[in-house]
Image (spheres, helix red, strand yellow):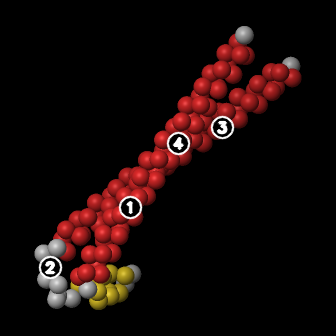
Amino acid sequence: MVADEEIRKAFQDLQFRTNETRAKIAQGEVNKTYYLQKKKLAEATLKNLEPIAADLPIYRAVGRMYLLATKGSEEQRYKDDVDMYQEKYSHVEKQKEYLQKGLEDAEKNLRELIQSKRS
């Protein structure tokens, strides 16, 4: 009776961790998509800045106002954005791999728990 109670508790705990890990992986996929879109947008904007002459004024939208900026500063800002979003994308990818390994271990433990209960 006590063993069944312990097994049930362990099963619930493993099931909770498995579901939580799956949710984190799904959220990571959403974040990866977001970072990839932002990176592509920054790359496209950077590409559109290339043909503009260096002496022309460039205005950057900040909220409801526009700030005067130089072409060089805007190019650098978008290059930094591309690098930042690529780094975040890579971080999420590594985190996903780590979570998947943990998920596989938890599922394996769950199977072992079920097998031990049947025995």
Q: Earlier in the sequence, mark 3 or mark 2?
A: 3
Outermost residue toward the top? 119
Q: Quadrant of the C terminus?
A: top right
The residue indicated by pointer 2 is: 52
Q: Earlier in the sequence, mark 3 or mark 4?
A: 3
- Please state which amino acid type lies under the numbered disc 2: Ile
Secondary structure of the residue carrying tag 1 is: helix
The residue indicated by pointer 1 is: 85
Seen in the picture, residue 43 relative to 118 is either above or below; the reply is below
Q: Quadrant of the N terminus?
A: top right
User: Residue at coordinates 30% horizontally, 69% vertically from top-left?
Assistant: 79
User: Relative to the observer, which residue lies in front, 20 or 116?
Assistant: 116
User: Residue at coordinates 46% horizontally, 53% vertically from top-left?
Assistant: 91
Pointer 4 local density, CA inside 10 Å: few below 14, some 14–19, many at least 20: few
User: Residue at coordinates 80% horizontally, 21% vertically from top-left?
Assistant: 4
Query: Marks 3/2: CA distance?
Result: 55 Å
The residue indicated by pointer 3 is: 16
Query: Marks 1/3: CA distance?
Result: 31 Å
Query: Marks 1/2: CA distance?
Result: 24 Å
The residue indicated by pointer 4 is: 98
Location of residue 68 (image quadrant): bottom left
Residue 78 x %, y %: 30, 71
Residue 5 x %, y %: 82, 25
Pointer 3 local density, CA inside 10 Å: few below 14, some 14–19, many at least 20: few
Query: Marks 1/4: CA distance?
Result: 20 Å
Residue 108 x %, y %: 60, 25
CB under 8 Å between discs 3 and 2: no
Q: Is residue 95 left or right of residue 11?
A: left
**Mark 3 or mark 4, whichever is nearer to me:** 4
Secondary structure of the residue carrying tag 2 is: loop
